[in-house]
Amino acid sequence: MNGAVTSYANVLLSLCGAPDAVADAQKAFQNCPQLTDALSNPTIPEAEKFAAIDRIFPESLRTFLKVVCQNGQIDSILEIFSEYEVLERRQRNCAHAVLEYVTPLTDAQLSAMKKMICAKTGAAEVQLELKQTPSLLGGFVLHIGDDEYDRSMRSAVRNMRKSLIRR
């Protein structure tokens, strides 16, 4: 992560008290790559870029996006938003984890999973990203930062195969 991205993310964190607005803006840029292309295009006048920002984004983000655009950093906007999420979670003492699964978990299972993640990370809360991954065959894989807990059938089959080959 370059220093400019982190600096912009820190500024965004200090300016914007609405994480939902940032999340919506992030989705807009992800769903419409042409938006980034247009805002970074040097042949489009700045006034037109600013008018587009005013039409599309909430007031709380407009000035920030205009400055990013003026400074030629709009190509890094998705990285800025990602770094903002990391900083915002850290500020709230919230862990981030990704759970890959085959069969959706029950509310009780999700609750237990979140409690376990809080215990492992020391965080007060957890933002759990759920991804259905049929190739796991069964079970789950949990990613917490650099740690991975693989309790999938795919992993069990792979380990069994390795074990049989060694014999």
Image (cartoon, grey):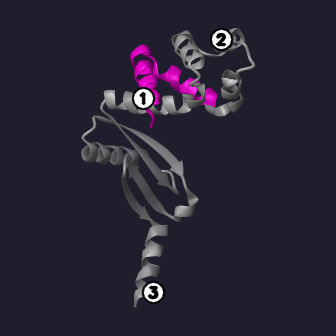
Q: Position of residue 132 (x, y in %)?
A: 54, 52
Placement of 52 over or under 149, stated as above or below: above
User: Which mark, residue 158?
Assistant: none
Crowd tier of the residue under label 1, counting other residues whose Cα lies within 10 Å: few below 14, some 14–19, many 20 or above = some
Q: Position of residue 52 (x, y in %)?
A: 69, 14
Instruction: Find out whether the residues at labels 3 and 1 contact each other: C-beta distance under 8 Å.
Output: no
- The residue singled out by tag 3 in the image is 165
- In the rendered structure, the answer to whether residue 154 lies left or right of residue 124 reads right
Quadrant in which the N terminus appears:
top left
Quadrant in which the C terminus appears:
bottom left
Q: What residue type is disc 1 on?
A: Thr
- Along the viewing direction, whichever of 100 and 42 lies nearer the viewer: 42
- In the rendered structure, the answer to whether residue 161 lies left or right of residue 29 reads left
- Along the viewing direction, whichever of 46 and 26 lies nearer the viewer: 46
Q: Give the magenta range.
A: 1-29
Q: Residue at x 43, y 57 (%)?
A: 141
Q: Residue at x 38, y 56 (%)?
A: 148
- The residue singled out by tag 2 in the image is 50
